[in-house]
Image (spheres, rainbow, N blue to C red):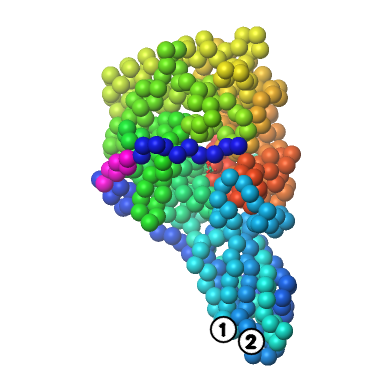
Amino acid sequence: MASFTILEEFVVKKQDKLLEIAETYKPVLNHSSKVIKPDEKHLGRGDSQLIDFGNHYVGYITLIFRSIGSHPDAPLSLNLRFAERSEEFEYKSEDYHGWLSKSWIQEEVLHVDVLPAVVKLPRRYAMRYLEINVIDTSPKYKVIVDEVTFETVTSATARMVMPEYNGDVLLQKVDKVCQHTLANCMQDVYEDGPKRDRRMWLGDLRIQALANYASFKDATLVKRSLYLFAGLLFNDQQISSCIFTEPTLEPDDTYLYDYALQFMSTLVEYYEFTSDMKTLKELYPYAKAQFDYIYKQVDERGLLPDKEGEFWCFVDWGEDLNKEASANAILAYCLSDAIRASEILGYTEDRQSYTEMRETLVEAISNYFWNEQRGYYHSGSMKQISKHTQIWMLLAGIPKDPSRLAERLTTLHEGPEMVTPYIYYYLLTALLMYGRKEEAYSIIKQYWGGMLEIGADTFFEVFYPNDPQGSPYGSCLVNSYCHAWSCGVIVLLRKYYM
Ligand code: RAM
């Protein structure tokens, strides 16, 4: 079972100057209201009413109730359930025993002592559906839901643009749903998902930033996010994988090698989109510090050793995935970004040492992970062959014959299943890098099209095409069905298919 690792030592080292800059880019949240006047139903003990807002939104709910019958002689008590997908209502929170907190389930028990009443719920929800279950009124009265208002919030300001894709309706739909997903995750920071975890993760941020450059073209929230991550270091100048913004700015005690290294990628890509040299220069040392820290772990083979059993490198949520080879490929991939950044900044010494580090690493990767007999890269002591590993080897430019590996990737059916749009984005990127446009199209059709087929208003955190309610957490009740790492595909749609 997957789980998080709690660090033994965790000393937060805030960089106040950077955090102050981040705060100057704090976005204004835009509000709008959706009002529904449900059909008049007289609800008593055990009755329910379903409200459908017609699309996925993020925000605050206000309900207006009145009674019918005698004067209410007992409080109204309700169980309210909020769902991003209606299928979630098939599962009961009391049956959830997964490893993520049960408190993520969007559900409330509410007492209303005096009717009529206007009840504004304090929590922010991510949802399309609201199920109002009456626990009880009294034998002498029933309740009517007169009005439900959804005050939606997002910090996205750019208008949606809808490319034509030469009349390809599927691609148009995927593009549109990506934009909607991204906008719903744009709040005070780039949230991974507005239902869960409602916070900013570094690996997610990179894809959100790229998706934004390709669509809304607004880099301000990316800039704020980069300053926040760099401003919230811990221990050995480490950049946390995830940060909390409330009640005060704090890093999480999770360090994922692939996420920390991708700070460099996110930074240099931000520069390439904005030409903001000041930010690149100011934040480069923090990106560099991640390589310094991670290189301390390199072993006698010149490689990052496996840390099986720990939550040390993300890659994907797939069960039993060995991450050793992917982690090393990601290190090589991010070293290329470090070379690019140091070159832009004119830091010749850094450029030279990153180039040497990369050359040595690529050689070690080729020696230890290439499986000549199988024609694939393997990973870990059990020599696991997975799609994940081949993807990162291709992206990092490790294979001698990358076109051949890209071709062989399309016919590889062993190893753990890929389960998140996060790794699917990298799969598509790897295939498209080597011209495999048709295979990439059929994956978009199966995977993103598969989500649309089951009624996705926004794209999901995880999707198992053969088990649409599947979850790495033990129940779909805690899955996030609006998760912006699913939007990476928009970058590729607009680059390769328009
Ligand atoms: C989960 C979320 C998040 C991801 C981390 C590693 O909590 O899905 O998006 O980045 O895991």
In the rendered structure, which segment of residues is drawn in magenta?
11-16
Residue 26 x %, y %: 36, 54
- The answer to whether residue 16 is visible is yes
Q: Quadrant of residue 146?
A: bottom right
Left or right position of 346 against 376: left
- The answer to whether residue 161 is visible is no
Q: What numbered label is drawn on residue 425?
A: none
Identify the residue position indicated by label 1 in the image: 114
Identify the residue position indicated by label 2 in the image: 72
Residue 491 x %, y %: 54, 38
**The C terminus sits in image quarter:** top right
Left or right position of 291 against 39: left
| Residue at 49% across, 67% down | 122
Q: What crowding class fits label 2: few (fewer than 14 Cα within 10 Å), some (14-19), or many (20 or more)?
A: many
Q: Is residue 367 magenta?
A: no
Q: Secondary structure at mark 1?
A: loop
Q: Earlier in the sequence, mark 2 or mark 1?
A: 2
